[in-house]
Amino acid sequence: MTEIGIGIIGGGYMGKAHAVAHAAVGAVFNTRLRPRLEMVAASSKASAERYRAEFGFARAADDWEALVRDPGVEAVVIASPQSTHRAAAELAFSLGKPVFCEKPLGASVADAEAMVAAANSSGCVNMVGFNYIRTPASQYARALITNGTIGEVTWFRGEHTEDFFADPDMPSSWRTDGDANGTMGDLAPHMINASLALIGPISSVMAQIETVHPDRGGVPVTNDDHAQMMCRFENGTMGHMFFSRVATGRKMGYAYEVTGTKGAIRFDQEDQNALWLYKAEGPEVERGFRKILTGPGHPDYAPFCQGPGHGTGYQDQIVIEARDFLEAIADDKNCWPTFADGLAVSRVVEAARTSHAGGAWTQVGRV
């Protein structure tokens, strides 16, 4: 086993999740590389020191550039706002350091393209964080689709819906300012990524994007609350997606349905340890969706728990990501999803924005 110094930019919600994941991943998966929590960077000395003490890092910094340049930091995890992603990644790659970047890849398509170019030029391992598709249930769904269990896929419906801004009296915050922090920048990338993973590339989209509550506490809202998008995949499959942060009652509505010629699949992240499968076989009177509870026989479940139906949780998804990142570094070979996969998501988001502005179908390849 070999140690590797991990530096995490950002100590908030996702920064803590990645710190916990790297502290646990060696024990969970017996990885060849064992992370050493070397340094955490935050926006002030006080917050950085607090994160260091709480999460178990050796050192703290109030400057992300100092973290990236530090020789003790051998791999960088970017868990800071989208506006910081590009500069941090480009510097890390210039120093020959692998980078894991939280989604979305950048604050714009231009950022994402530049980050992919920097990754390719450096030859360094790169990975983008789309954690929800890593549940054992969704990994199993992906396998069922790939091996033809439900036949030829004819339809996809996906949503990422939450209600953290459903109350119109919620005050304004950083989330209500700027496209990158709106629903299309924040929630949509997760379900778009899921659709690309499950069905394949998207060729064209027709989208509508809206701000439901244009004013919060007297402060104008400058980004979107919800959006819907029809899409056509390159393999001919029809699809529809809905994204919302004002979906009253929905807490983690990352859900999808996939219809095929021989069956269908349903999944809802609010019940993340179950997958619903329908097979068009046997007597008609006995057909119906059946609930499959995940267990040790499903992908990446057994390292967490030996009991079927006991379940995995949100943090476990981040641990799986950490395992993939470390294994990619050990093998010096990228694994899915790379920065290029993150760029593919950014291009679909941009195509949706273009479609909304023009009121017409938009080809993703022209973005």
Image (tube, helix red, strand yellow):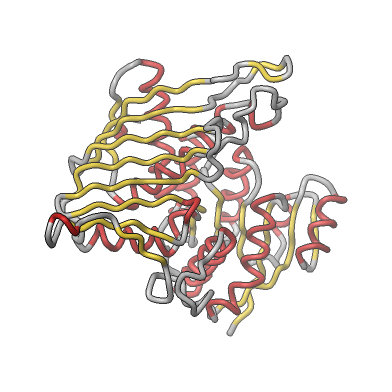
- Res 169 → quadrant: top right
| Farthest front residue in view | 285
Q: Is residue 243 left or right of residue 348?
A: right
* Residue occupying the point 49% across, 57% down: 127
Residue 111 lies left or right of residue 216; in this view the side is left
Residue at figure coordinates x 62%, y 48% from the top left? 88
Please indicate whether residue 79 sits to the left or right of residue 193 in the image.
Answer: right
Q: Quadrant of residue 182?
A: top right
Q: Residue furthest bottom?
A: 1
Residue 174 at x, y = what percent? 68, 31
Closer to us: 28 or 246: 246
| Spot occupied by residue 164 in the image (x, y as percentages of width and height) | 62, 36
Q: Is residue 128 visible?
A: no
**Vertically, is 249 above or below 68?**
above
Residue 195: x and y in percent read 34, 46
> Quick check: 113 above or below 96?
above
- Disc tally is 0
Residue at image point 30% right, 25% down: 362
